[in-house]
Image (tube, rainbow, N blue to C red):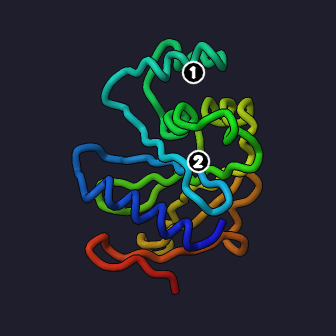
């Protein structure tokens, strides 16, 4: 995944989030194929969704049958066409809190089960490093989250330009 795509994803995230302090966390998922953003999904914890109930029944996820609330990854899967639900599509998952700091956005076990059944294997998520500056975005994958293997992206406040050192 190229830095320009990450930059565009973060710009879209900040445009939608716009320092809203209504909820403690906001979770976004971006589907990327050939460095182009295909679809955007976000969590909706405020109300139950028929989409989540449908996905729970379709992929046999008991928790979503009982509590049908959309996660960012599940919302994203409902927006993807069948041609993009394969191993060539990458998912970039980002969680941001009300203060603008990145948090761990690793897909839950139910979202991971759904992504595996769909065939999407390349998933990147944001992590937080308490030792580092809160303005760093650390990307993790399913196979490694080692400090020497992660990419760091520094961002500024949304009023200013997003840049990479």
Image marks 1 and 2: residues in contact by CB distance under 8 Å: no
Q: Position of residue 105 (x, y in %)?
A: 53, 50
Residue identifier under label 1: 55
Residue identifier under label 2: 106
Give the answer, above or below, for where 46 lies relative to 83: above
63 or 120: nearer the viewer = 120
In terms of secondary structure, where does tag 1 sit?
helix
Quarter occupied by residue 49: top left
Q: Residues within 10 Å of mark 2 (few under 14, many from 20)?
A: many
Q: What residue is at 23 percent from the left and 51 percent from the top?
A: 21
Closer mark to the observer between disc 1 and disc 2 = 1
Give the answer, above or below, for where 76 lies relative to 157: above
Image quadrant in which the N terminus is located: bottom right
Specify the label residue 69 is tagged with: none
Q: Where is residue 114 in the image (x, y as percent from the top left)?
A: 66, 30
Q: What residue is at 29 percent from the left and 60 percent from the top?
A: 99
Q: Where is residue 24 in the image (x, y as percent from the top left)?
A: 31, 46
Quarter occupied by residue 67: top left
80 or 11: nearer the viewer = 80
Q: Where is residue 37 in the image (x, y as percent from the top left)?
A: 55, 55
Q: What residue is at 66 percent from the left and 36 percent from the top?
A: 112
Q: How far apart are marks 1 and 2 (CA)?
A: 19 Å
Which of disc 2 and disc 1 is earlier in sequence?
1
Q: What residue is at 58 percent from the left and 47 percent from the top?
A: 106
In terms of secondary structure, where does tag 2 sit?
loop
Q: Residues within 10 Å of mark 1 (few under 14, many from 20)?
A: many
- 72 with respect to 97 (left or right): right
């Amino acid at each position: 995944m190229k830095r320009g795509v990450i930059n565009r994803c973060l710009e879209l995230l900040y445009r939608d989030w716009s320092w809203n302090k209504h909820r403690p966390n906001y979770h976004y998922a971006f589907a990327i194929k050939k460095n182009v953003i295909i679809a955007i999904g976000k969590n909706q914890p405020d109300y139950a969704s028929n989409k989540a109930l449908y996905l729970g029944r379709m992929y046999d996820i008991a928790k979503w049958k009982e509590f049908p609330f959309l996660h960012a990854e599940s919302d994203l899967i409902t927006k993807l066409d069948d041609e993009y639900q394969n191993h060539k599509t990458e998912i970039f998952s980002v969680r941001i809190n009300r203060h603008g700091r990145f948090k761990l956005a690793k897909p839950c076990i139910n979202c991971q089960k759904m992504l595996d059944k769909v065939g999407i294997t390349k998933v990147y998520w944001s992590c937080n490093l308490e030792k580092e500056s809160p303005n760093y975005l650390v990307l993790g994958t399913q196979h490694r989250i080692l400090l020497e293997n992660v990419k760091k992206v520094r961002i500024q406040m949304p009023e200013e330009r997003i840049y990479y050192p």
